[in-house]
Image (cartoon, grey):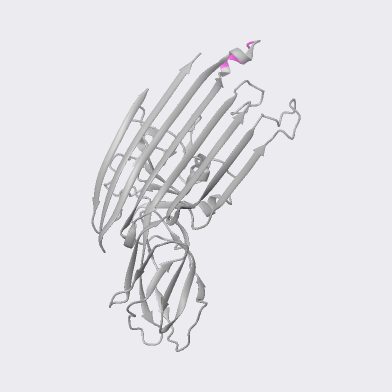
Amino acid sequence: MRSLVKIAIILTFPVLLYGGETGRIVGKVTDQSTGQPVEDVDVYIEGTELGAVTGSDGGYVINFVPAGTYDVTAAHILYEPVKQIGVVVLADQTTYLDYKLKPTVYTIDKPIESIAVKPIVIISSGATERHITAKEFDQMPIQTVTEIIELQSGVVSDASGYQHVRGGRPDEVVHFVDGMSVRDPLTGHEAFTLNKGAVEEVSILSGGFDPEYGEALSGVINIVTKEGGAKHSGLFRYTTDAVFPKENPLNFGHNFFEASIGGPAVTKKVRYILSGELRFDDDFNPRHFRTYQPQDEYKLHGRLTFRLPRKIGKFSVSGFTTRRQHLRFRNTWKYHPDLEHCSRSYRMKDYFAQGKLGLKITQNTILSLKGGYLLHNYQTGP
């Protein structure tokens, strides 16, 4: 049994958080007819408490924006309001969003809508990066975060499920969850994998990353978890192959349950999300012949977020636990008459908890305090 406690205090000045989980929106508002900057424009993210007011130069900055897709509106009493739909905010990145407002003497209740386009190239980063959002991988035929990562170019997984980036070893890849490293200090591998329902964004850096990622030799994988939304929502999904008879070669005893629920709690400034998975397999690694490799896996993730008054920052606490037990068949035993007793047992359980406080000191100065706890237990036997 190994226990690891990590406490990190990070001061970030005009740069974003190390292995962060939030991004920011920066832009400028100008008059459509004259091109002059417009002051005192209210730029806000719909469904959240986040927003900013433009200064004398027409510029604005919205900090502490969780990774995700939003609708952002710019409104002024002397101009027609404009809403940009589908603005994608990525962790550790700056999204640039400019507005050109049209003067009006009438009051317009409904803003003019335009669809934001996700940039193909992130100009603020010199690294080779790929960002996959929850909206994108919800449309993919996958069930796990590992499958999402495997679909990216330059990434492959070995027989044990560990990722290799650009031909490097698994211990040369550093994994982060909400900016905290989840690396097993003994093996250097990823200690656990989150359930898909808890993930908002997966970003993969496979080359040219900054010196801040000094522990990484071949790649960095940063996972950002979801926050509760402005409205209550939930999900339940069940997948099985039990539609086939037990003796059918297509029936591997696969039963997969996933559920999530989230939304505001008490007030709009407090939000929660809870998600989990249950997985049961009679043979978790199918081969050309039927083997005895049962697997049971349980995952549970929760997060509670508090928005501080006057939009000065936020405080969040989150936790994750998983348990997995399975038997692994050895090919050297395939002719043994009693296959049920020719498998090696594996048992794993993990506990991960963290607390984070982010404060906006000035327009370009952010204070971030983080503390985390990771317990990784691994047992194997005959």
When asked about the image quadrant of residue 56, the answer is: bottom left
Residue 150, compared with residue 92, is above or below; it is above
Residue at 30% across, 39% down: 215
When asked about the image quadrant of residue 277, the answer is: top right
Residue at 62% across, 20% down: 292
Q: Which of 39 and 120 lies nearest the eye of the viewer?
A: 39
Q: Which of 315 and 130 lies nearest the eye of the viewer?
A: 315
Residue 98, compared with residue 228, is above or below; it is below
Residue 167 image point, x, y percent: 41, 38
Q: Which residues are magenta?
A: 332-336
Residue positioned most to the top: 337
Q: Can residue 191 be seen by looking at this rendering?
A: no
Report whether 206 appears left or right of 248: left
Residue 279 image point, x, y percent: 58, 33
The image shows a total of numbered marks equal to 0
Q: Can residue 301 be seen by looking at this rendering?
A: yes
Residue 225 image point, x, y percent: 44, 47
Residue 27, compared with residue 300, is above or below; it is below
Magenta segment, principal secondary structure? loop
Report whether 125 appears left or right of 159: left
Residue positioned most to the bottom: 105
Residue 6 within the segment the image draws in magenta: no
Residue at 25% across, 45% down: 9
Residue at 48% across, 43% down: 149
Instruction: Quadrant for the N terminus, please.
Output: top left
Q: Which of 247 and 127 lies nearest the eye of the viewer?
A: 247
Q: Which of 5 and 139 lies nearest the eye of the viewer?
A: 5
Residue positioned most to the front: 266
